[in-house]
Amino acid sequence: LWVEHARDAIAFYEAAFGATVLHRVGEGDDVVAQLAVGEARYWISSASADRPSPRAHQGATGRVLLVVDNP
C-alpha cells in the first residue's frame, strides 16, 4: 500500500488490527515496512513520484504479490 503518511499508517494498523512490524527501512514518513496480521503479510510504503498516493491517483494504490513455495 502506498500512503502519504507511512508512519501514521503503520501506527494505525498496529493499533486497529494488532499488526506487527516484520521489517522497516527508513525514518519518519519516508518508510517502507512489512507488517503482519496473523498469517497475512503486507507492505506499507511512502508515496513518491513513481508510487503515487491514493489522493494523487484519485483512487486506491497498491500492488499484489502472491508468494508460494513451489511456483
Image: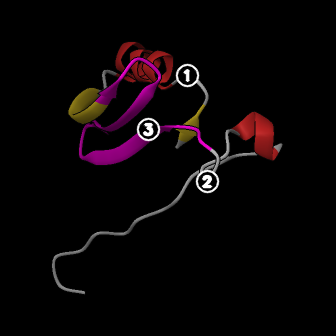
Residue picked out by circle 2: 50
Distance, label 2 to label 3, CA atoms, is: 15 Å
Q: Looking at the picture, how far across and down is residue 57, in whole percent?
A: 78, 46
Span shown in magenta: 26-48
Q: Amino acid at mark 3?
A: Ile
The total number of labels drawn is: 3
Q: Where is mark 1, residue-wise?
A: 5
Left or right placement of residue 56 versus residue 41 in this view: right
**Mark toward the start of the polypeptide (2 vs 1):** 1
Quadrant in the picture for the C terminus: bottom left
Please check the rendered image and state whether residue 55 is part of the magenta-colored stretch, yes or no: no
| Numbered mark located on residue 44 in the image | 3
Secondary structure of the residue carrying numbered label 3: strand
**Nearer to us: label 2 or label 3:** 2
Give how far across and how far down residue 24 sits, in percent: 25, 33
Residue drawn at point x = 61 percent, y = 28 percent: 4
Residue 46: x, y in percent? 51, 35
Q: Could you tell me which residue is drawn at 37 percent across and 69 percent down?
A: 66
